Image (cartoon, rainbow, N blue to C red):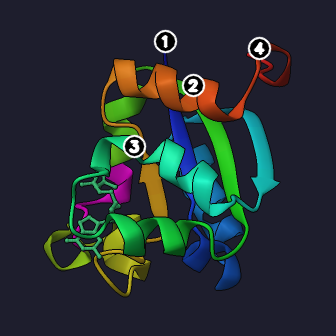
Amino acid sequence: MERTLSIIKPDGVSRGLTGEVIKRLEDNDLKIVAMKMIHMTRAQAEGFYAVHRERPFFESLTDFMSSGPVVVMVLVGEDAIKRYRDLMGATNYKDAVPGTIRADFATDIEKNVVHGSDAPETAAFEIGYFFNRFEIVG
Ligand code: GDP
């Protein structure tokens, strides 16, 4: 069993896609073991995306991620990191396979509805960034 961090980004929450994303997770055996809605400050978004500090889109991305509420979740399942990323689709929705969350709903390379950890080490960092052990039920 593997854990991964999922975020429904501000565009997903404001467009009313929270239920749709959660349905896809549950339909695909990705079990939610922690969940909350938060509105990140700019500094919190910068800390979360610190690995992208040098990227040209860092300022725009952290602006976007702190622009409204997000839903953060911990998912558990077999091969959860890869299976959730497969459900999400490619970063750029134009390259995403039809039927993936980003292909179906993203409007922009940045406003791409969801985030998912990309490796076990990043999952551990990202889960710990938002949740303490008492907030994770499985
Ligand atoms: P992910 O793991 O698929 O989310 O992709 P990355 O880790 O490469 O990038 C993190 C996030 O930065 C993406 O989900 C997008 O929201 C945003 N992003 C990635 N590439 C670009 C880009 O070229 N321009 C802009 N504006 N945002 C980007």
The residue located at (38%, 31%) in the rendering is: 81
- What residue is disc 2 on? 76
Beta carbon at label 2 within 8 Å of ligand 1: no
- Which circle, 3 or 1, is nearer the viewer? 3
In the figure, 89 relative to 10: above or below? above
Residue 114: give x, y in percent of width and height.
Answer: 48, 61
Q: Is residue 27 visible?
A: no
Residue that sits furthest to the left in the current view: 95
Q: Is residue 104 left or right of residue 10?
A: left
Q: Where in the image, quadrant-wise, is ligand 1 located?
A: bottom left
Residue 60: give x, y in percent of width and height.
Answer: 39, 75
Looking at marks 4 and 2 on the same chain, the residue that comes earlier in the sequence is marked by: 2
Give the class, few, some or many, for how many residues have Cα within 10 Å of label 1's Cα (few <14, many ≥20). Answer: few
In the figure, residue 94 lies in which quadrant? bottom left
Q: Amino acid at mark 3?
A: Ala
C-alpha separation, residue under disc 1 versus residue under disc 4: 17 Å
Do the numbered discs 2 and 1 sit on residues whose CB atoms are within 8 Å?
yes
- Which circle, 4 or 2, is nearer the viewer? 4
Q: Magenta segment, which residues?
A: 86-92
The residue located at (38%, 78%) in the rendering is: 104
- What residue is disc 1 on? 1
- Which circle, 4 or 3, is nearer the viewer? 3
Foreground residue, 14 or 62? 62
Do the numbered discs 3 and 2 sit on residues whose CB atoms are within 8 Å?
no
Q: Secondary structure at mark 2?
A: strand
In the figure, 47 relative to 127: above or below? below
Residue 90 painted magenta? yes
Q: Is residue 25 visible?
A: yes
Q: Amino acid at mark 2?
A: Val
The residue located at (31%, 27%) in the rendering is: 119
Residue 103: give x, y in percent of width and height.
Answer: 31, 75
- What residue is disc 4 on? 133
